[in-house]
Image: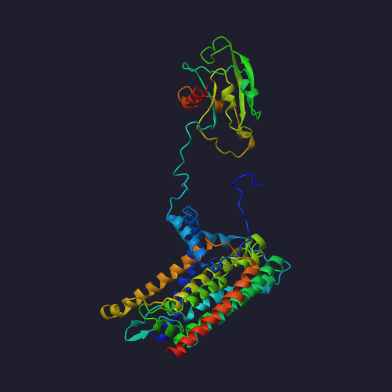
Amino acid sequence: MQLTNRSKVIAKKEMSFMERLYIPAILGGLAITIKHLFKKKVSLRYPEVTRAFAPVYRGMHVLKRDELGRENCTACGLCAVACPAEAITMDAAERKSGEENLYREEKYAAKYEINMLRCIFCGLCEEACPKDAIYLTDRIVPSEYKRNSFIYGKDILVEKVDERIDVSKRKNEYSILN
Amino acid sequence: MGILSFKIILILLIFLVSLGIAAYSTYGERKVAAFLQDRLGPDRAGPFGLLQPIADGVKMLMKEEIIPAVSDKILFILGPCIFMMTSLMTSAVIPWGTPVHIGNSVFNLQVADINIGVLYIFGVVSLGVYGIMIGGWASNNKFGLLGAVRASSQMISYELAMGMAIIAILLMSNSLSLNEIVAQQKGMNWNVFYQPLGFLIFLVCAFAECNRTPFDLPECETELVGGYHTEYSSMKLGLYLFAEYINMFISSAVISCLYFGGYNFPGLDYLSTVLSPNLVSLISVGALFTKIFFFIFFYMWIRWTIPRFRYDQLMKLGWQILLPLAILNVLLTGGVLTFLK
């Protein structure tokens, strides 16, 4: 019984004389390969030329500050819970008086570490964050010589006050999704 | 300038040219491979990666030299030497161009115009298999030995058909001297137009003799690790690989001489009446090298087009198809020459 019309009848049919000559087949093959000689090459001369990133590329994380330069993160731990690779750890601390210009709310992350060897760059942490604090950027995590060097602390993750990192593209992606 | 000093200079020149071409064939091979696969190939060492062969050579020389403890030391070293030597020796009888005039004397651009040139080539080429055989045997390695056995049986099988294809040429030209055979193919009077079948047989056999794909079973990586040179390292391995590229160069030269008129090209006669003989000689050398380069490219082109044969297919092709075809070709040529001329 024929179930679909995709089935193909395969018979060990004898090759015709022309097929057994092989020469036409070889010439056909040569024609195919010579066409590739003139095709556009897919290789990029990497350090000089880089491939364009997708606008929503998920690379190295950034811990954002607000417009006044205060850290957004309140060390709620939602990102650490959401992280499927368990790459994020943090210690919370209470904001002392006089530190209002550093931290936006009364609680802040005294220590915030992401293990870049564990991270799978899925972006679930930024999805979980209620405070707009963590985003993935289009920066690439550089290679290191020691495994310990891949544990990034706040010194690397928090953006500098004077060089803000643009995450509007990632933000847009969420506005499209929601 | 005496004939001796001219010959010595010519020999040195041919040696250098064949070594240079072999070195740049490795580069060409990688570039052609890359371009046929939509890649760029080596382009880091120098402009367009042109210094890559030098880097490769330095790498080969700097690598550790390993001679297996269980190997036969003398034969192990002798193997690559024989292979390299035979592949360099073949170039002696190839006529590279029209004669050059230096002072009052005329010199042929050929190291030795012996009257058995074609036989000489065959003799030396079949000696080349000893290099592979000895190397594979002396490494005391099953893969090495298998590769060597494959190489020798393959070469013996395909030399027969190759010789038969050549006999048709010899019937036509009445001479074994390569110089004579080339001289007879003046203008566009190339043998390939009279012997298309013979050319095809010779071409296939030349691929087999050079151990090139689709006949590279003696060193097929998927089955035999490295084949006959599995145990070789450093420059001894380099010599084997290098000699193979020289073989490719020489066999391209032989194909050009036997079937594509060697240094001949249409208009050579006219040019020799208007230009100085040395200039004509230079142009004719250029013509020969154009043909050689095309065939070297063709070797690489085939390599990235056709997959490797299975060993029984290889033997079947050699004995049951090419050899009868070659004999038929000889009979046809002989018949035509006897009854139609």
Q: Position of residue B55 (x, y in %)?
A: 51, 59
Query: Quadrant location of the N terminus of chain B?
Result: bottom left
Q: Position of residue B234 (x, y in %)?
A: 60, 63
Tell me: residue B79, above or below residue B175: above
Image-based side of B176 in relation to B142, left or right: left
- Occupied quadrant, residue A79: top right
Q: Position of residue A34 (x, y in %)?
A: 45, 59
Look at 64% across and 44% down and name the residue there.
A3
Tell me: residue B81, above or below residue B118: above
- Occupied quadrant, residue B337: bottom left
Of all residues, the one furthest to the top in this rendering is: A97
Pick the front one: B191 or B209: B191
Residue B79 in view, yes or no = no
Image-based side of A112 in relation to B336, left or right: right
- Occupied quadrant, residue B70: bottom right
Look at 43% across and 52% down and name the residue there.
A39
Residue B14 in view, yes or no = yes
